[in-house]
Amino acid sequence: MAKKYFTVMIAGIVKAGMEEYVENFLTKLMQHSRKDEGCIAYNIHRSKQNPLEFMLYSTWTNQEAFEHHNQSPTLQEFKKKLAQEMFEEQSPKTYWETLD
């Protein structure tokens, strides 16, 4: 049986005027998160159609690695800022498992 990786996706629309700040913040978060144990991929995307829309896609060796990452002080700070300062709206976080 093949190993099943754990993937997380979330997207959101940032507040107008916050685009560059959010892009810089998310880039730093991505660079930091890629170093976390169990991280296979961590990518931030910006919509070509709507420059206010961002999407995060990350894959982990397992759910436990993601949960450990999610509880880190860096992520706690991000989630606080995310809710209070950066985004107008965001999609529900969705969790996925690879099929191969």
Image (cartoon, helix red, strand yellow):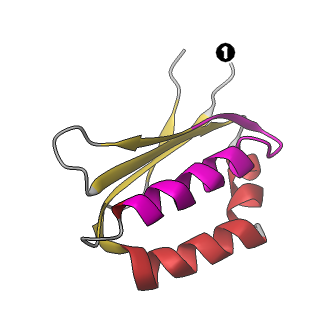
Q: Is residue 24 above or below residue 9?
A: below
Q: Residue at x 42, y 82 (%)?
A: 85
Residue 37 forms part of the magenta stretch: yes
Q: Residue at x 28, y 54 (%)?
A: 53
Location of the C terminus by quadrant is: top right
Q: Does residue 88 appear anywhere in the picture?
A: yes
Q: Residue at x 53, y 56 (%)?
A: 24
Q: Nearer the viewer, residue 81 or 27?
A: 27
Residue 85 forms part of the magenta stretch: no
Q: Give the x, y percent position of residue 31.
A: 68, 45
Q: Give the x, y percent position of residue 65.
A: 76, 48
Q: Nearer the viewer, residue 42 or 31?
A: 31
Q: Give the x, y percent position of residue 71.
A: 73, 68
Location of the N terminus by quadrant is: top right
Q: Main secondary structure of the magenta part?
A: helix
Query: Bounds of the magenta span?
Result: 20-42
Query: Which residue is labeled 1 in the image?
Result: 2
